[in-house]
Image (spheres, helix red, strand yellow):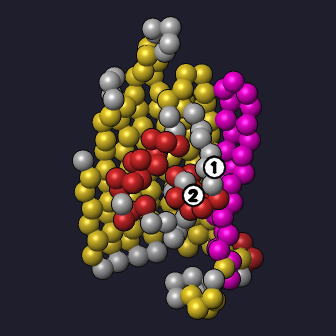
Amino acid sequence: LAVGYSGGAVSLAGALRKAGSPPDYIGVLIAHLGPYGLTAFGGYGQFLAPDGSKYTSLFVVAGITAPIGGPPAFFITGLGGGAGINRQLVLPANLDDFPNYPLVAAIDPHSTLASDPQHALDELSSAFPPERGNFWFAAGVSFTCFALVDVTAVVAVSVGDGFQVALLGLGRMALPTTYAPLVQ
């Protein structure tokens, strides 16, 4: 189930999918009102382990995009975070996939996930598959540096079979602006 609306400075997109047996529910909500945005992703399911026992798995990611403020060298434009219980954190294998990776897209003011909620659900399913004993959390920030470079940075920590710390970053520079670039 997916719905969307776009009119003027307002856009709203939401989707919910039930897949598999036992069912895995994954949902996304993306809202924008001018320069302000809210993104929320989530998933919940009960799964069978190889030994036949049941376990509950869930993840939640939320982010806001807005001109929050700060000095010109670090003007904050978005904040976000997320956590997963019994969910694996699959990092993008290709650098071209960074802009669409859910942890980055949740706080990226230039994200295009709202234009295709079905694709967003596919990204969530592959980025956070259920896996018993895996736990992760992430926090991120997007900012501009002197209004020339747009940066999105996310740090994620995953604990399961091992301990993994990941720093994901995406930087864009466009002249004269990212909204009307002549050079990028």
Q: Look at 51% across and 70% down and name the residue there.
A: 110
Q: Majority secondary structure of the magenta segment?
A: strand
Find out whether residue 167 is within the magenta segment. yes
Quarter residue 10 falls in = bottom left
Give percent across and percent down for residue 13: 32, 59
Q: Residue at coordinates 64% horizontally, 59% vertically from top-left? A: 95
Residue position marked by numbered label 1 in the rendering: 93
Q: Which residues are magenta?
A: 148-172
In which quadrant of the rendered view does residue 34 lie? bottom left
x and y, in percent, of residue 149 in the image: 68, 77
What amino acid is found at the position of numbered circle 2 in the picture?
Asp
Q: Element under label 2?
A: helix
Position above or below: 163 against 150? above
Which x, y percent locates residue 125? Answer: 45, 41
Amino acid type for the residue under numbered disc 1: Ala
Question: Which residue is disc 2 drawn over?
Answer: 97
Q: Relative to the observer, which residue lies in front, 162 or 6?
A: 162
- Residue 170: which quarter of the image? bottom right
Q: Is residue 129 left or right of residue 71?
A: left
> Which residue occupies the foreground of this view, 74 or 47?
47
